[in-house]
Image (cartoon, rainbow, N blue to C red):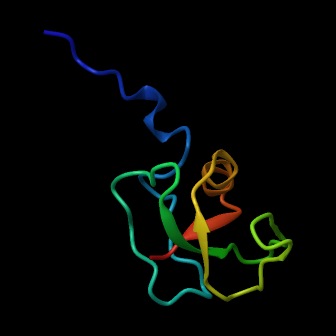
């Protein structure tokens, strides 16, 4: 019986710790599974980050929640800690 190797599971940073509670998001929670491509999620830009929202063509508003359709870029931003999933 083969056992799955989960070494790379944390590389996209969506599991443990990726949804750490930012000071500007009071309802952040921890997510056990990464979002799927094409899924719509709610995110907030991390504290002290300035980030361009490719979906609407302007910067994310600091401290305000925004909906995002999950793309490869969204997954990378979550992994890098630039975006935090809040709902």
User: Which quarter shows the C terminus?
Assistant: bottom left
Picture coordinates of residue 50 (x, y %)? 85, 72
Left or right: 46 with respect to 56?
A: left
Q: Residue at x 28, y 21 (%)?
A: 4
Residue in front for this viewpoint, 25 or 55: 55
82 left or right of 25 in image: right
Residue 81 horizontal/vertical position (percent): 66, 59
- Residue at horizontal 61%, vertical 68%? 68
Count up the numbered dots.
0
Q: Quadrant of residue 84?
A: bottom right
Q: Position of residue 12 (x, y in %)?
A: 55, 43
Depth check: 5 or 59 in front?
59
Above or below for 38 versus 65: above
From the top left corner, tell me how far across and down residue 43 is, in percent. 58, 73
Residue occupying the point 36% across, 52% down: 33
Residue at the extreme left:
1
Query: Is residue 46 depicted above or below 9 in this figure?
Result: below
Left or right, 6 with respect to 84, comes to left
Q: Residue at horizontal 75%, vertical 67%?
A: 55
Q: Residue furthest top?
A: 1
Q: Nearer the viewer, residue 40 or 51?
A: 40
Q: Quadrant of the N terminus?
A: top left
């Amino acid at each position: 019986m083969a056992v799955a190797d989960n070494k790379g599971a944390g590389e996209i940073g969506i599991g443990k710790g990726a949804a750490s509670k930012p000071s500007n998001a009071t309802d952040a929670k921890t997510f056990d599974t990464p979002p799927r491509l094409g899924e719509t999620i709610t995110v907030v830009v991390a504290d002290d980050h300035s980030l361009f929202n490719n979906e609407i063509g302007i910067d994310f508003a600091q401290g305000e929640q925004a909906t995002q359709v999950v793309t490869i870029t969204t997954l990378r931003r979550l992994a890098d800690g630039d975006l935090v999933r809040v709902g």
